[in-house]
Image: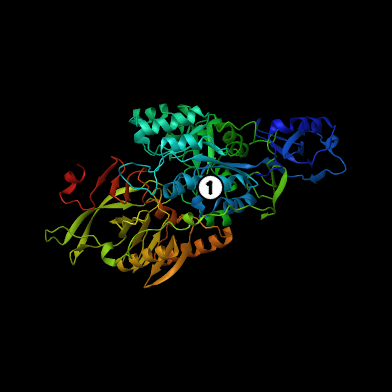
């Protein structure tokens, strides 16, 4: 963090002196239409800033101006810097520094990040690296200590496992704001000792417990989960989900990421049902670099909420003061009020939110869409750049599914069904042809494989997936594979699947798309196989080429790569794949790909 930025208690005397007119402000904003998120008003008020904090906010700040005071005259709207209540930096394919550099011009000045992606690969040392680089940025990056690595014990294997002792240790770090999303909701509901111990350590530290209840069941199981301590949840997909969460005293976090469109289906709890909006928060969860560079970040979410019928000032509250209040920081940020960090946006339109200027901690950090400050990097160590260990080179034979030895020409199989713009999948069934002793994909159904890449065991788990629309001979491989982050390979051809997997082992991780015997696109992610420390624009350009390559392979889903990367997320229904096999998330158990005994045996 900027060493010149001081705690409120250390500069209170200066703020009082500026507000009283006894000493000049560092910066004064005159003539703006100030969005007061405490009262939901637009006020023709001025703002005076000193020591990186708001000193005077009122109708006339002329008494705060001295000979060296910087004066900005602005007749448009003056709004608080935007806060993302739940997000994963790694989903942007960028390090914290490059992520900050990408989102600052869009008006995001505060992020509450959960680095559980790197936790699965590198454990507590990886989390510490993310935490430390976050604290170096010119905006506010708070870290939630990851809670679930693995997210579903017994159903997947991670590179490292997070313990209750790890959580207790991290709670002492300066930038830790709470516990990351508690994805192991069956563990909480069933009273798992480690999950309860992690939440207890967080509560003893006086910090916030993040939730992740990815089930449509709002009966006793949900009530038991709420009783366990999670204070928020972002996994709702419909109005009933949002309503039940706030009725239980939780904050309902409504997300708009690159592929998750869960705001429109839940915001009716406010716009139509009339519930108090104070307990609703906007967030992104997962945004890849292309979205950040081309479409925006939290400004995109606020615009979307308004387009869904939300009052602009209510939408703004859900991206500022509501978020700050939830994490116990309402006296520190989230509004333009005395004592708070001077995080400000200039915009000419409250509905479309063009971002003309961004001020963070009293300093202009972006102007007219261009960043004007530095975002410092840490020195990422060698162990963070050498994390793809999948053993021997993969062969096409490892990406085949043998047919049952019954001589049948077809086999009945389970299929993961991708649902566009949503995290949940469907548990589908299909009859597929048998050729040469192996089961083959057909039509929209292609193959999926999970390649173990943490402990060099070299295991390959195979299954089937539908919904991508791939055609011809192709494959796409990715070492971003939430949450265990092995390697997911999807393809129509075993030879191409082997080519894509081996390519990622060669470059140390990333995404590789192959078609007709050649590589169409490559996004190198050398840090933990998850991130790049290259500039956001470069990563976004490679990501755009990857998206185009997927389209060239026949895929027309919105942000299909995000769907691809979540196919191993074994805590979100219905059907997923892990290094241990196919996982029925409705029952939290491993199930065979081939349904040898028909429906009755398949559900047994």
Q: Position of residue 284 (x, y in %)?
A: 52, 45
Front position in the image: 146 or 284: 146
Q: Position of residue 213 (x, y in %)?
A: 40, 36
Q: Residue at horizontal 42%, vertical 66%?
A: 506
| 519 is higher (above) or lower (below) than 339 | below
| 340 is higher (above) or lower (below) than 116 | above
Q: Residue furthest right?
A: 67
Front position in the image: 241 or 490: 490
Q: Residue at horizontal 44%, vertical 53%?
A: 562
Q: Which quadrant holds the N terminus?
A: top right
- Dot 1: element: helix
Q: Residue furthest front?
A: 382
Q: Position of residue 580 (x, y in %)?
A: 29, 49
Front position in the image: 544 or 142: 142
According to the picture, the residue beneath numbered tag 1 turns out to be 130
| 517 is higher (above) or lower (below) than 484 | below
Q: Quadrant of residue 517?
A: bottom left
Q: Position of residue 87 (x, y in %)?
A: 51, 44
């Amino acid at each position: 963090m900027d060493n010149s930025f001081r705690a409120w208690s250390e500069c209170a005397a200066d703020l009082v002196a500026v507000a009283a007119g006894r000493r000049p402000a560092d910066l004064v904003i005159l003539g703006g239409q100030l969005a007061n998120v405490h009262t939901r008003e637009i006020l023709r008020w001025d703002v005076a800033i000193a020591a990186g904090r708001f000193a005077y906010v009122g109708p006339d700040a002329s008494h705060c101006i001295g000979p060296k005071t910087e004066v900005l005259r602005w007749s448009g709207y003056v709004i608080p810097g935007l806060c993302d209540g739940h997000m994963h930096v790694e989903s942007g394919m960028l390090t914290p520094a490059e992520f900050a550099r990408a989102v600052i011009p869009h008006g995001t000045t505060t992020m509450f990040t959960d680095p559980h992606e790197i936790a699965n690969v590198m454990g507590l040392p990886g989390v510490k690296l993310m935490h430390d680089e976050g604290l170096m940025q010119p905006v506010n990056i708070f870290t939630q200590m990851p809670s679930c690595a693995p997210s579903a014990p017994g159903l997947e294997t991670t590179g490292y496992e997070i313990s209750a002792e790890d959580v207790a240790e991290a709670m002492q770090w300066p930038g830790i704001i709470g516990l990351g999303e508690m994805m192991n909701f069956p563990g909480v509901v069933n009273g798992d000792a480690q999950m309860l111990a992690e939440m207890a350590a967080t509560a003893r530290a006086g910090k916030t417990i993040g939730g992740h209840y990815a089930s449509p069941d709002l009966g006793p199981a949900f009530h038991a989960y709420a009783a366990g301590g999670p204070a928020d949840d972002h996994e709702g997909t419909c109005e009933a989900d949002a309503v039940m969460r706030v009725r239980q005293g939780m904050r309902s976090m409504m997300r708009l990421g690159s592929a998750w469109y869960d705001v429109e289906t839940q915001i009716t709890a406010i716009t139509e049902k009339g519930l108090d909006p104070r307990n609703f928060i906007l967030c992104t969860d997962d945004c890849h670099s292309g979205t950040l560079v081309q479409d925006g970040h939290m400004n995109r979410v606020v615009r979307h909420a308004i387009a869904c019928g939300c009052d602009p000032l209510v939408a703004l509250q859900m991206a500022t003061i509501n978020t700050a209040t939830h994490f116990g920081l309402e006296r520190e940020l989230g509004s333009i009020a005395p004592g708070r960090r001077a995080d400000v946006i200039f915009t000419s339109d409250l509905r479309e939110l063009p971002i003309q200027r961004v001020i963070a901690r009293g300093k202009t950090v972006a102007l007219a869409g261009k960043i004007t400050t530095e975002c410092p990097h840490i020195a990422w160590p060698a162990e963070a750049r050498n994390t793809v260990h999948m053993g021997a080179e993969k062969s096409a034979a490892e990406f085949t599914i043998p047919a049952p030895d019954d001589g049948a020409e077809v086999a009945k199989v389970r299929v993961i069904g991708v649902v566009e713009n949503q995290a949940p999948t469907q548990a589908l069934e299909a009859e597929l042809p048998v050729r040469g002793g192996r089961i083959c994909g057909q039509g929209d159904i292609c193959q999926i494989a999970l390649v173990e890449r943490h402990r060099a065991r070299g295991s390959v788990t195979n299954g089937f997936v539908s919904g991508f629309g791939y055609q011809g001979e192709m494959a796409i491989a990715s070492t971003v594979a939430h949450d265990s982050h092995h390697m997911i390979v999807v393809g129509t051809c075993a030879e191409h699947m082997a080519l894509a997997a081996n390519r990622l082992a060669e470059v140390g991780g990333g995404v590789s798309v192959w078609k007709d015997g050649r590589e169409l696109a490559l996004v190198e992610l050398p840090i933990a196989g998850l991130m790049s420390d290259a500039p956001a624009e470069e990563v976004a350009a490679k990501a755009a080429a990857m998206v185009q390559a997927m389209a060239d392979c026949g895929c027309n889903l919105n942000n299909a790569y995000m769907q691809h990367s979540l196919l191993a997320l074994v805590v979100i229904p219905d059907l997923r794949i892990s290094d241990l096999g196919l996982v029925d998330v409705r029952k939290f158990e491993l199930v065979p790909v081939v349904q040898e005994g028909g429906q009755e045996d398949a559900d047994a």
